Image (tube, grey):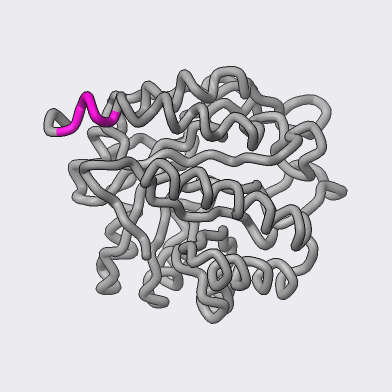
Amino acid sequence: MITFSKDRFTLIAGPCVVEGREITRDIASTLSEICTKYDIPLIFKASYRKANRSRYDSFTGIGDRAGLEILQEIREDFKLPVVTDIHLPSEAAVAASYGIDMLQIPAFLCRQTELLEAAAETGKYVNIKKGQFLSPSSMGFAAEKVSHKGNRNIVLTERGTQFGYTDLVIDFRGIQTMRTFGYPVVLDATHSLQEPNQASGVTGGKPEMIATIARAGIAAGADGIFIETHPDPSKARSDGANMLKLSMVEDLIKQLIPIKDAIRGIL
């Protein structure tokens, strides 16, 4: 069950992409144990396929069916809601048929009307990531493309704004701007620290800043935190440069809880 509460922030976390059954289940198990311990609602995240890679030879997944079946297993075995990316309108119903609880719209695709409408028509939660090129206020129009189909199960995610060619910056005012639309707002503390468009064709990042960004996001009123994590980010097959090491997740959660407690009733 997907939950957003004034008393607790929700954690959306997992690996960038399904790399295989064992490692994905191990990550889900660890995250589930941590969030149960601290009473933090968890939505497990992993893409069954990555379509927006810089290079043609980048890892995109283990196969759509195999990836979706693993996510379905995790949902059933660990009793966790699951979110995954979709990139084409036709993928929405397919992903939903595997029990996916939340369909995520990648930042580059947040203005794609047919994609948003197809996700809305499944009745699932739709997490719209704010485009790096988009103002926070413009996300209201993206949300309307979902809500006009009768689906108000919407989440908006801040993930940074393009700053030059190879960096991103976060305007924390955007969290409050997007909250005025009446939907939960999540801060993506890992993708916000990407360094895109590197000469190598592989995105860089600043993972040492993840805790700083996450703490600031909670203080600014974010309803949830999004984190990509891996047991060994240096060996992750996608976006490892901006991932949080799995062994560091519990410490981060312990840092965020008192901040959330401190602002409860204020924002």
Tell me which residue sits at (72%, 46%) in the image.
53
Residue at left offset 60%, top offset 72%: 72
User: Foreground residue, 228 or 51?
Assistant: 228
Extreme front residue here? 37
Tell whether 90 sits left or right of 234: left
Vertical side of 40 occupied by 119: above or below:
below
Q: Of helix, strand and loop, which mostly describes the magenta segment?
A: helix
- Which part of the image, by quadrant, shows the C terminus? top left
Residue furthest to the right: 57
* Residue 184 drawn at (x, y percent): 28, 48
Which residue is drawn at the image coordinates 71% and 29% (left, top)? 241
Q: Is residue 182 found left or right of 37 in the rendered image?
A: left
Using the image as rendered, state which of residue 179 and residue 38 is in the foreground: 38
| x and y percentages locating residue 125 in the rendered image | 38, 64
Q: Which residues are magenta?
A: 260-264
Name the residue located 60 percent from the left edge and 54 percent from the top edge. Answer: 28
